[in-house]
Image: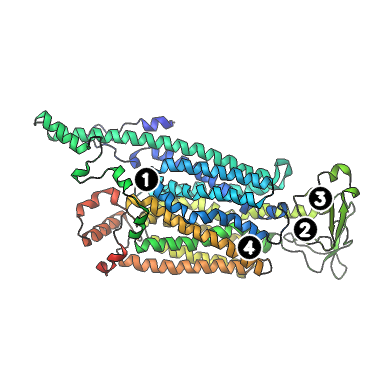
Amino acid sequence: TSSPSSYMTQPLMLSSQNDNGAPPPMIRKKSSLRSRWLVLVLICVVMTGSYYTYDIPAALHQQLADYMPPSSNYETHFNLLYTVYSVPNVILPLFGGTFVDRYGAPLCLTVFALTTFLGATVLSIGVANQSWEVMYLGRFVFGLGMESLCVAQSTILSDWFDGREVALAMGIRRGISVLGKVWNNIMSPIVANDGRRGGIEASFLIGAVLTCSNVVAAGMILVVDNNATKRLKRGEALQSMTDALLEYEDEDMEEIDVTASRRRGGDGEDNPQDGGETNQNKKSGVHITDVQKFTPIFWLLTLSCLMVYGCILPFNNVSSGILLERNFFTPSPTDCGLEDPDECSAGYLHQEKNNAFDAHGDICSIAPTQAPVLPSSVNHSVADADAKRSDDWEHDEYVYSSLTSKHVDCGDPFWVDGCTSDYCSKQNAATEHAGKIMSIPFLVAALLSPLLGHLVDRIGRRAQIIVLSSSLLVIVHLTMALSTLSPIAPLIGQGIAYSLFSAVIWPSVSLTVPKQNTGTAFGVVTSMQNMGMSLFPLAIAAIFNSSGRRYIPNVEVFIAACAASGVVVGLVMNCLDSRYGNKLNAVTAKQLEVTEHFIKAGNNEEVSDLEDEDDMYYSPIHPSEEGEFS
C-alpha cells in the first residue's frame, strides 16, 4: 500500500522513452498524478462530516420540540436554524469563490473547515443551555464556513481531475459524502432518545467532533497539494531546459542560456512576453466583476439550482415531521378515551392498566402507526412521587386541565417513565423509524451518484437530465401531498432525482465559464442556492402555521410547485443550449471539441487554442454576442 508521501515522490516521467525514441513527456498537470485519488478520499472525509453535522437538526425535529422550552412558534424557531445558516451565504460564497481563485482552494478549504468546527461547537453549547439564540449563532458561524467549503472542494476536484474524470470524481465524492446524511438520520435519533448515551446534547456534540476531524483532513489536502505544485513546477522547469538543449544543441552556449531563460520566464513558468501568462497573473486578474461576462446558460443553471435544490434540501429539513404526521405517528382515534381520563396512561405513577375505550364501550383499536391515547388532564407534583424518582423531573409540578400532545415532553423523565411511558416509547420508535426512511433519498444518491457521474461523462445530455430530474420531483411531491401511499417509493424517486440533478448541475458550471473563474462561478451558484435555502424554510414554516400546524397537503404542494418551476427553467435552458452548439448536451468529448471549434471560429479566435486543455470548459458566449450565432 502506498503512503501519502510516496504519491508525491513518484517519477514525473511517463516512461523512459516514447515510440520514436524521443525523451518522454513530462507530467504537467495534477490530473496526471496518482495522488489525485488521495485528495478525493480526503475531500470525502471532509464533506461526510460536514453533511452529518448540517442535518442533525433535521433528524431531531420531534426531539427538539420536546427538549426546547415550550413555544407555539416552534416550527418557526426550528426553520430559522436553516435560515440563519443560509442568509450570510447569499453573499459570502461569491467572495469565497473569489478568495479560492486568488489564494488557492486548499488553503481556503482548511480555513473554512476550521470555521465549521467553531460553529458546530457553539451550536452544541446552545443546545446544552436550551438557548435558541446561541444555537442561531452557532448555525450562522457553521454556515459561514460550510458553503464556502463546498466551493473550495468543488474547485479542488476541478483542478485535480481533467474533463473526462471531473464528473466521475464529483459523483464519487457526492455518493460517499451523502452517507453522512444517512448516518446522521439513523444515529442521531437513537442517541437523542437514550439518556444513557447523553441524549440530545450528545447528538450535537458528535457534530463538533466530526468537524474537528475535518480540519485535520483539510490540512492534509493542503500539504499534498503544495507538494504536488512544487514537483510539477520543478518538472516544468526541467522540461523547458531539456527542450531548449535539444533545439539549440549546435548553437552557441550563451544563446542556449538566453533562449531557455526566456521560455522559463526565470522561474520555470511561461514568459508573459512570449504570449503566455503565469498562474499568478491569472489569479491577480480575477475579480468579482467577472460575473458580468458569464453566459446566459450559466445564469439559467444558477436559477435551476435555486429552484430544484429548494425541493430537496428544505424538504429534508422537515421530512421527519412530515413522515410522522403522514405515516408513522398519526393522531389516535378521536372517539377513544382512557378508562380513567384524569390519570396517567402508563408508568410508575399509575401501576394499574388504564385501557382506552371507544364511544361504544369497546376496547379502542389503535393502529401500529397511531399514537396511544393520552389522559384528558394531569395533576402531579414532586410531593406525590418517590423522592428518588422525582429528583429527575424537570419541573416541580405538572398541572394540565386539558392535556394535549404539545404538553408531553418525552425527554422529561416525568413523562417518559412516570406518566405516559406508552406514548413516549411509541413516539421514540416512530422517530427512529422515520429517520431510517428519510435516509432513503441519500442512500439512493450514495449508490447512484458515482455511476451517474461516469455516465454523464460519456453521454452528456446535461440540460435534458435537469428537466428529467425536475419532472420526477413534481411527481414525487404530488404523490406525498395527495395520496396515502407508502413514502418509500416517492422517496426512492426523490433520491433518483437528487442523484440525476447533482450529477449534472455542478460539472455543468465549469462548462460555461472560463477556467480561471471556476471558483467564482461555483460561488455564484452556491450563493443563489442559499438564497432559496434562506427563504424556503421560512415559507414552509408560514404555510405550516397557516394550515392548522400541519404539513400535508399544503407544504408538499408548495414543494411540487418549486419543482415545476425547475422544469420550466430546464426547458428554456435546452432551447438556448441547442441554439449555441449543445454545450451542455454534448454527447461525447469529440462533439464537445467540435463545439469549441465552432464557437471560437465564430469569434475569430485562433483554432489552435482548442488544443489547450486548460480552456476546455470555456464558453465565450456572452449576452452581448448572442446575435452572432442567431
Callout 3: helix, strand or loop?
A: loop
In three-dimensional space, the C-alpha distance between marks 4 and 3, rounded to whole angstroms, equals 39 Å
In three-dimensional space, the C-alpha distance between marks 3 and 2, rounded to whole angstroms, equals 13 Å
523, 438: nearer the viewer: 523
Q: Where does the image place residue 626, in percent across and percent down from the top left?
A: 29, 67
226, 352: nearer the viewer: 226
Task: Please say if 232 is above or below 469.
Answer: above
In three-dimensional space, the C-alpha distance between marks 1 and 2, rounded to whole angstroms, equals 54 Å
Q: Are marks 3 and 2 in contact (CB under 8 Å)?
A: no
Q: Are marks 4 and 2 in contact (CB under 8 Å)?
A: no
Which numbered disc covers residue 407? Answer: 2
Callout 4: helix, strand or loop?
A: loop
How many residues crowd around disc 1 within 10 Å: few (fewer than 14), some, or many (20 or more)? many
Q: Is residue 19 visible?
A: no
In three-dimensional space, the C-alpha distance between marks 4 and 2, rounded to whole angstroms, equals 29 Å
Which numbered disc covers residue 512? Answer: none
Circle 4 is placed at which residue position? 486
For marks 4 and 2, the one nearer the N-term is: 2
Q: Nearer the viewer, mark 1 or mark 2?
A: 1
For marks 1 and 3, the one nearer the N-term is: 1
Q: Quadrant of residue 103?
A: top left
Circle 3 is placed at which residue position? 395
Circle 1 is placed at which residue position? 102
